[in-house]
Amino acid sequence: MQTLGAILAQLLHLVLMLAAAPLVVGVTRWLKARLMGRRGASPLQPFRDLDKLLRKRPVLAENASWISEIAPYAGMAATFAAIALVPSFARGMLLAPAADLVLLAGLLALARVALALAGMDVGTAFGGLGAAREMSFSAFAEPAMILCALNFAILAGTTNLDAISATVQDGQLGLRVSLGLALLALAAVALAENARIPVDNPATHLELTMVHEAMLLESSGRHLALWDYQAALRLTLWLALLAAVFLPFGTAPAGTGPHFWVLGLLAWVAKMGMLCVALAVFESAIAKMRVFRVPEFLGAALLLALLAAALLFVSTGLA
Amino acid sequence: MVVHGVCLAVCVLVAVLAVAALGFGLPAAPQALPLGPPWGRAVLALDGLSAWFLLLLGLSGAAASLFALGHAPAPARTLPPFPLFLAGMMLTLLAADAFTLLFGFELMSLASWALVAADHSRAENRRAARLYLTFAAFSAACLIPAFGLLAGPSGALDFASLRTTPPDGWRAAAVLLLGLLGAGAKAGLVPLHVWLPLAHPAAPSHVSALMSGAMTKVALYVLARLLLDLCGPVQPSWWGLPLLAVGAASALFGALRANLEEDAKTLLACSTIENVGFVTIGLGLALAFRGADLGTLAALAAGAALLHALNHGVFKTLLFLAAGAVAHAAGSRALDRLGGLIHAMPVTTACALAGALAAASLPPLSGFASEWLLLQALLAGWRVSDIAFQVAAAAAAAVAAMAAALAAAAMVRLFGLVFLGRPRTPRGAGAQEVSALERWALILPVGLTLLLGLFPAAMLRLAEPALEALLGAAALPPVRGVALTGGEGVSAYLPLVAAALLALAAGALVLLVRRRSPLATTRGPVWNCGFIDPPAHLPFGDPLTQPGGGGIAQPLRRMLGESLLRAREQVDMPEPGETRPGRHASGFEDPSGLLLLAPVARLRDRLAERADRLRDLTIHRCLSLSFGALIALLVLLAWLEAR
């Protein structure tokens, strides 16, 4: 019975995430447009775009290799595997024992490498530039993420996402300065990983500023649809990750039935909506930074996470 | 042909015997050979640690020999040193007394020096070989006194009696320092790594593969044997700190340099520095955890080090052999002269991709499994109740994560520039796939990389005797079922689940997407934001419109290189009206070369200048000098006799 519930929760979670991803992007775009005084496209627009792209015939460059054809599937599969591990409305899903933060970072890195290789496949200037920048940013984002994982490992005794979420929800930790600092650090990493302002601008194709879009210039048709969907899924994943770790309230505990799930679902929708609003407000209020300022931004996140860990060392040493 | 065939057979045999020894129990007693130094006999023994590293050596050596078999016949002068090199490494690993170990170590160094100097008609190879020999001598000059101090006044050199008298006080500290310097210089640990990016690429490719894949591991074996096994379990927790610091520095500098190098094999050599650093971090953590009585975590860290050594041995051999295949087929190792080889060399490309993804430590390949264990060990560093160590471990965790991300960037750069894009030279455009044997020498390590990635838990079970040799009989490998476990067993990495999830997702995705989007792809000219087609006289387009090695390196060169590696860029912009072309140059200098080698070279020059004056002495002074030396030696002898 328990296993059946776990399987069901996992499947529902996957369907929910797949359905929510374009909506999250659409809602964020719509909110940003409203904040800037425009009417904005409907939040359902990403669905229509994806459908349109899927129906188009993909065009590959003459010298494109099988990397260009495989990479979108590889990147999407890695992101999909990663999102299967992040709890949304319920904990104790089938894959919860495998939901490790370091594995999550590894899967996201796999998706990133697939994207970078696709960008370099044809040998155009923009693709190479975007790939180089994307990989360089990750050199600053990953240590910050691992140090956040260190904070959770000290507080919850494990890097398993499900267990961390449960520990925070239990409330035994109380309000911790370290958790706050880790929240800031992880949020900064999330912005960088998703190519959002201030690191990159998701709404522009201006060559000098772009990172993520530069690698997609040669993709079309279903390949572009897969990359766009992957980007939406990744944004959803990061917001869900922030919600699962720092706002685990209302999530159905492991081994509970459908009535808890409904509550958990409502809470999750509310949390994701809140995070979308926060993202839209933040992006509207701040300007994009120069590419070579990004290490400072992510370095600050790294230092915050290190500071959080040092505070924990001191407090556990005193206790 | 015969030489490499015999080497291949011996290496396969060694690997099989090592697996058998690890799996079905080890021969008990050390065997004394009927030969050796005047004061004793050479003793050989096969314990768990030796068997684990022999397995690594067998696998790496077999792939390298197979590649050499398929390659064009090597010049005759490289034939004798190759089996000697292998024999030296095996002797080092099998030795059970200090003399035999050092003898094997020096045999390995000298034989590989001859191989590095094989192509001595080129000045840079001569320089690399000279530097290599100097560092090998330095390494011996540190290791011999280290073992001497360990043996103490009794002078018994076999490992069994060395274990009975663990050093303490200043002697222990000296053994730690000398062992770290000696083995570290041979393994390429920062700051004694200057020779490695020069020497490893200078040798023929199959030898480079063996040097990077196996020889650095033999040096790490000596480090582990000396510090974890022979010095005994009584050493304090702070012993881990120097190894942790040196390992983290190596990981960071190696990975960063790999992002800036312009030569494929040099890039791989720098990535070796990074991975050697990872293994050293693991060994340092094992020392620290053992000193703090955290047995589970010590086994976790040591298991990470052992597994990473094996994984790196396999995938780095693969990558070096692929680089050799590329250099042979496309006529260059320079990143800026290659490109687009994916069309001409499909098998080599696929194999190199697997190796590069493993080197970038991506799931579900082998590099990720050991990297995961290592990060778990680092994330458990706070359990040692010493705040200095806790902060050091946290910093090392950040550095290791950064090095892993930098390694991924370096591998994307290597693969993207060599195999993707357009050819950059006509010679590169005419490349052809390598011979069947060479292809098999690449495919077999790929299979091993996949297996090691999917079944790391089984490998760690196999490594249990090695863990026992390092940490004592109570050490259990950090596994549960098919999963790797970390952090007191709560966190788990299930490689099979991750791989199955990825495969299922990819399969379902292909089915779903193709149902919704059935149109076949078509080909068209490159879009490239509307850039025009190349002119007819440049069939692959202008190479300069494609990012090169320097261009891909630019973000990291500016973000990290300027502060850590003294990277600089020079732009020579002509004034308006001038007709000369504008130029952009970039480069970097490794600070350890400047801070370490330059003062030593100055000192050498000054000493040579002093010694030079002795030539002009008069006959009286010459005679009195020899007489004085004789008297001094006699006095020394008398004093020693009197004691």
Image (spheres, rainbow, N blue to C red):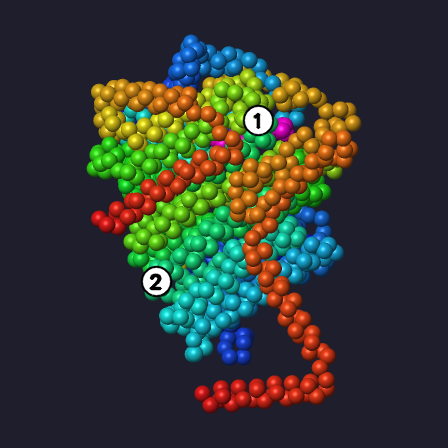
Mark-to-mark CA distance, 1 and 2: 54 Å
B148 or A291: which is nearer to us?
A291
Q: Which mark is residue B407?
A: none
Amino acid type at circle 2 is Pro
The dot on residue B236 is 2
Q: Which mark is residue A208?
A: 1
Q: Residue at x 55, y 21 (%)?
A: A205
Q: Main secondary structure of the magenta part?
A: helix
Neighbor class of circle 1 (other Cα within 10 Å; few <14, some 14-19, many 20+) is: few
* Residue B404 picture location, percent across and down: 48, 42
Q: Residue B518 versus residue B326: which sits nearer the camera?
A: B326
Q: Where is residue B192 in the image (x, y as percent from the top left)?
A: 54, 58
Are both tags, 1 and 2, on one chain? no
Q: In this view, does A83 lie above or below B201?
A: above
Q: Quadrant of residue B595?
A: bottom right
Q: Which chain carries label 2?
A: B
* Front-lying residue, B18 or B512: B512
Is B588 drawn above or below residue A210 in the view shown?
below
* Element type where label 1 sits in the image: loop
Q: Is mark 2 on a helix, strand or loop?
A: loop
In the image, residue A114 lies in the stretch drawn in magenta: yes
Image label count: 2
Residue placed at 44% from the left, 62% from the top? B225
Is B542 on the left or on the right of A155, as rendered? right
**What's drawn in magenta, residue-wise?**
A111-125
Q: Can residue B56 be seen in this view?
A: yes
Q: In this view, does A187 lie to the left or right of A1?
A: right
Q: Residue at x 55, y 44 (%)?
A: B561
Residue A173 falls inside the magenta stretch = no
Q: Is residue B193 visible?
A: no
Task: Evaluate if marks 1 and 2 touch, with contact meaning CB atoms under 8 Å apart.
Answer: no
Q: Residues within 10 Å of mark 2 (few under 14, many from 20)?
A: few
